[in-house]
Structures are given as C-alpha cells and as structure tokens.
Amino acid sequence: NERCEKELKRADDNYDRKVAFYAKLNDLRPLPEDWAAIRRKCFERDNYICAYCGSRGGDLECDHIIPIAQGGSNLLSNLTTSCKSCNRTKGARTPDQWRAA
C-alpha cells in the first residue's frame, strides 16, 4: 500500500536524522578530564555563584547558556555556573526562553 510505504520512508528519514544528530553531539562532547577542567574554570570565573538565582556554593553545575540542542557549544564563553535546581528547571532552553515560561 502506498500510504504505508510513505509512512515507513518518513520513519526511516526521522531515524537517520536522529542518528546524525546524536553522532554530532558525541563529536562535540569533551573528554571527561577536559570537562572537569572546563567546569573548574567556569566556577572560578563566576566565583561559585549561580548566574540565575545568585546562590553561592552548594551543588553547582556548569550550564550551557545556549544549549547544545540549539546549536550551542562547550566553549567557556557559552557556559555559566548554575545551581542544580536552576539548571534542572532551565533544561534545554536559553535563559530568555526559561524566564518566559
């Protein structure tokens, strides 16, 4: 049936796009030892203060200002210090998108 063939083709195309997307993410992901150094530099630069709520210390994470899923990078200029709570609620959104929600 022609309709079934179209649906199968679309599913295959979607799968291929997803595989390519995740392959690209793996290429962008720093090695664990490099990521540890990047995080340390980010925390030091930001004085261990969450960029979103202003809390100091605690359970901090390194947040992508422009998420990788939206074309962001792992460059220090795209990273900021975030407390775990802010980072988890922000998710894969930019700060503006998060605040608008």
Image (cartoon, rainbow, N blue to C red):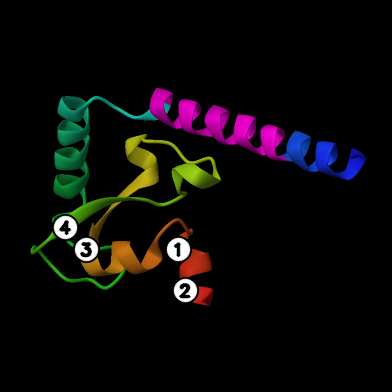
Q: CA distance from mark 4 to mark 2?
A: 20 Å
Is 101 situated left or right of 30 in this image? right
The magenta-colored residue range is: 11-27
Q: Which residue is depicted at the point 69% across and 39% down? A: 11
Q: Residue furthest left?
A: 58
**Image marks 4 and 1: residues in contact by CB distance under 8 Å:** no
N-terminal-most mark, 3 or 2: 3
Is 54 situated left or right of 47 in this image? right
The residue singled out by tag 4 in the image is: 60
* Image vertical order of residue 31 relative to residue 70, above or below: above
**Image marks 3 and 4: residues in contact by CB distance under 8 Å:** yes
The residue singled out by tag 1 in the image is: 95
Q: Label for residue 30?
A: none
Q: CA distance from mark 3 to mark 2?
A: 16 Å
Q: Amino acid at mark 1?
A: Pro
Q: CA distance from mark 2 to mark 1?
A: 6 Å
The residue singled out by tag 2 in the image is: 99
Q: Secondary structure at mark 2?
A: helix
